[in-house]
Each structure stands twice: as C-alpha cells, then as structure tokens.
Amino acid sequence: MAAPYASPAPVPVISVKPLVLDVPGRGEALRVRISAPMTGSDLPVIVFSHGFGSSSDGYGPLVDFWAAHGFVVIQPIHLDSRTVGLAPNDPRTPRIWRLRVQDVQRVLDRLDLLEAAVPGLGGRVDHSRIAAAGHSFGGQTAGTLLGLRVHDPVTGNADDMSDPRIKAGVLLATAGRGGDDLTPFAAENLPWLKGPDFAHMTTPTLVIAGDRDDLGMSVRGPEWLTDPYHLSPGRKSLLTLFDAEHSLGGIAGYDVRETTDENPERVALIQRISLAYLRHALDIEHADWTAARKTLSENPTPMGRIDSK
C-alpha cells in the first residue's frame, strides 16, 4: 500500500555486526549491531531492545526502514537472547530486566566508540536526538529508560532508571499493570511484571498495541497492553492496530515462525507511523505526524486508530 503522505526518501543502508563492548560484571561481552544510512549528517539515534529470546538479527522490517529513512539504529543483544544460551537457573536470571536496561545505558555511554567503529559513520551522528524503542520485553526495557519504574524482585525497590539522554520512545506490544491483572503463570514466572509504576514515565512516547494480542499474561486480555499509554503522564500517543496479535503483523522479522498474524500492510503502517512520530517527538519535522494522524482518521476502512493526550 502506497504511503498516503510524504516521508524522507529511502537511502542505502550499511549494517555492521558484531561490535563488541566489554562490560565488567556482566559475564558476557555485550554484542551490538548498528544499521545506518550511508548518506546524511546529524543522524538521530534509535536504540532498539529486542523481545525475550530474540537478538540483533531480528526486527529487520523496522530496523531497515528506520535506517533507510535517516536513523542510526543500534541493537544490543541482551542476556536472554537464544544466541547467548543463558541457563534458566543462572544467578543473573532474576536480574535480567535490570541488566537489559544497563545494556542500553552502556551503549549510550560508549556511543562515540560505536560510531567510530562503523565505516563512514564517524561525525555524522546527532547525540542530542536519541530515542529508545522495544518490542514486548524490550518494550519494558525501553519504558524503564523513559521513566517506568519496575518493582525489582530481588531488592524489592522500584528504582528510577530513566535516562535523560533519551528524548522519545516507541513501545510495541508492551506489558501493562501488574498485581491482580496478571495471570498465575505471569505472576510466578515473570516477577518483573508484578509491580510496574507508570506514573513517572513522562518522556514523549508512542505506544503500539494490537487489539487481538492476548498472550495469557493478563486476565484483562489485549486491553492490558494499552496501559503504558493510559497510566503514564505527559505527551503520549497510542496506535491501536485492529486484528493485530503480538507480532503486530510481522515486525519481528521477514520470516519468523512466531508471526501468527502476518500482514505486510500492517507492518508498513507501523513503519510509517513510528517514523513520523519519532521525527515529530525529536523535533526534526512535524508535518508527517500531522498528516499520518489525519490520513488514518479519515480512512473509511482503517487498520487502526491513533489517540493522543
């Protein structure tokens, strides 16, 4: 489906992996993939956090699109990735949620080093325009950097791990409220979901949720995934995708078996809406976001709707 509004013309992309960062105390080196446009300057940054078990080899439909349209996309591989092979009884497992957040912070701490390691990228990155994005578990990781506070199952604390370097976010199919909203399985096996606090998540954020995304983590069904929008203050937008399940039409990869609701048009909509939102939230350009919302609202057979506050 052709884009109904203007967007930057795509350019060739260079992708480099693995870039390796030594992180004392992590137990494994932090492997990173960077995808960036081959041309352009003052390039904004998206740090993307993958879903549970995935890696930097995933999410090509989003990463490739964002990079081709002017963003440097950085993908750290978290310890829960199947490529790491961490045992379930590993002592780091209860701290996986926190180590994920620290992975993104390490990437930002060493952005100069990573930038210099990609041929032709040095000096072309705008360090003042950084966004965090993530899918599923990665959405919680990104949300924590945006101000979400997670009740740590080890310490019992809900620490502020927000990062002022991050100016905007995109949360895709991200967990909502804990407590009685969780199913017994989620409460027992995913303790980092028990007590999220969205009251401090003030950074501008686009939340994307499917209205058929029912993973069995919440007794409330798909509505649960809209909590990051409804329960957080500040400037937020919510893209609700009709008939979409957890992979939102296939964002996790071009050919992944987890995609049960494959829909290229839905993925194309997510690509365009997220790009327009990030360019708006990072104060790069605003017309595309205005046009995107108008076009979707006026479509007689829309694939979703956008709410904003």
Image: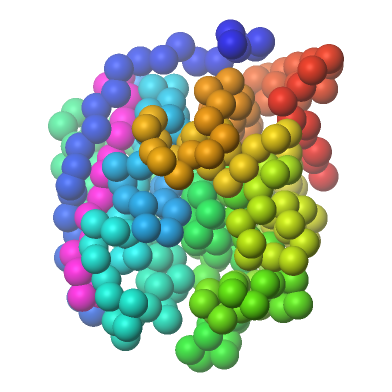
- Write down the quadrant of residue 29 in the picture: bottom left
- Total tally of numbered discs in the picture: 0
Task: Residue 304: say if magenta.
Answer: no
Rendered view: 299 above or below 201: above
Q: Is residue 278 visible?
A: no
Residue at image coords 37%, 58%: 53
Residue at image coords 76%, 22%: 302
Q: Is residue 81 left or right of residue 52?
A: left
Which residue reaches farthest bottom? 155
Residue at image coords 48%, 56%: 138
Q: Position of residue 31 (x, y in %)?
A: 22, 55
Q: Position of residue 58 (x, y in %)?
A: 35, 42
Could you tell me which quadrant the C terminus lies in? top right
Rendered view: 180 above or below 262: below
Residue at image coords 82%, 22%: 297
Could you tell me which quadrant the N terminus lies in? top right
Q: Nearer the viewer, residue 65 or 40?
A: 65
Task: Residue 32: say if magenta.
Answer: yes
- Write down the quadrant of residue 116 in the picture: top left
Q: Nearer the viewer, residue 267 or 285?
A: 267
Q: Is residue 10 left or right of residue 30?
A: right
Q: Which residues are magenta?
A: 26-39
Q: Position of residue 215 (x, y in %)?
A: 61, 57
